Amino acid sequence: MLDARDNFQSAGWYEALERTVALTVAAEHPERILDVGCGTGYYLRGALAAVGDSARALGMDLSPAAVSRAARSSDRIDGLVADVWSLLPIRDGAANVILNVFAPRNAAEFHRVLRQGGLLLVVVPQQEHLQELRKAGLALDIQPDKAQHLTGGLAAHFTLESRQGLSEQLNLPAPAVAALIGMGPSAHHSGAVGTAPATAGTPALRAVTAAFDLFSFRRRDNTP
């Protein structure tokens, strides 16, 4: 799964999303960034490059292998293996920005470790994301009320500041399609095939929709 992420992301297929995340984070001029669900650190490295040399980051994931890759990829990233649903071993108000890309969210703990006025940037897939692969039985369905569920779950601790949509059609060669399937939850689902044979016999290029919502939340400072 991590190899698939590295292969797909390093090829630049999600560069538009990476760039938008980086610019949003850089506008905060943060000193400390926490990436919850950091994976291999792709979006975090982009954010650090946009912010400048003074910022440092903590990449957190449940996977020790993922954290290891993220931390090794930059001397400005420290690693933390932790469960997002537990009390995080991070001091109060430690981060200016929390980055959360396709990952679970713990509203109370995010509020605690984020500084006053801090930004929580959440990225989730739109309903159209990978719709071609879903129709072909190669990707899992997306929760239809995902955006509503997200905002409702964070409302007690965060105020929604902005929502930005990002959508493009990618013309992917078969190896990139295999990597895209293999880097997500579809690769571990019994009803979906997430390896190269899944794309055997397909056209040289497959049109795939990449569609995301980026939510910027501001920490509610009147919440205990």
Image (cartoon, helix red, strand yellow):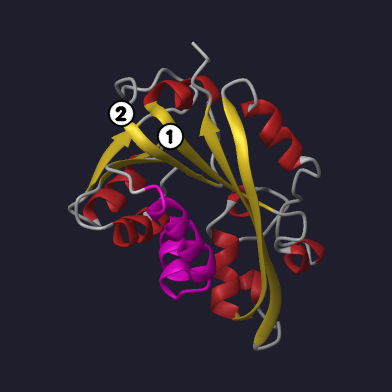
Magenta segment main secondary structure: helix
Gap between marks 1 and 2 measured at Cα: 10 Å
Q: Is residue 95 left or right of residue 196?
A: left
**Considering only vertical position in the picture, is 11 above or below 102?**
below
Give residue 96's position: percent from left, percent from top: 36, 37
Viewer-closest of 101 and 120: 120
Q: Are marks 1 and 2 in contact (CB under 8 Å)?
A: no
- Spot the residue most to the bottom: 204
Please report whichever mark, 1 or 2, sits nearer to the chain's N-terminal start.
2
Whether residue 87 is in magenta: the answer is no
Which residues, given as a range, are shown in magenta? 1-28
Give residue 18's position: percent from left, percent from top: 47, 63
Amino acid type assigned to the residue bearing label 1 in the image: Gly
Amino acid type assigned to the residue bearing label 2 in the image: Ala
**Label 1 Cα crowd, 10 Å radius (few <14 / some 14-19 / many 20+):** many
Q: Is residue 159 left or right of residue 139?
A: left
Residue located 46% across and 61% down the image: 5
Give residue 81's position: percent from left, percent from top: 33, 34
Query: Which labelled disc corresponds to residue 94?
Result: 2
Residue located 73% across and 33% down the image: 149
Residue 139 is drawn in which quadrant?
bottom right
Disc 2, SS: loop
**Considering only vertical position in the picture, is 41 above or below 149?**
below
**Label 2 Cα crowd, 10 Å radius (few <14 / some 14-19 / many 20+):** some
Query: Which labelled disc corresponds to residue 118?
Result: 1
Residue located 66% across and 72% down the image: 168
Numbered marks: total: 2
Q: Mark 1 against mark 2, which lies toward the viewer?
A: 1
Give residue 70's position: percent from left, percent from top: 31, 51
Residue 91 is drawn in which quadrant?
top left
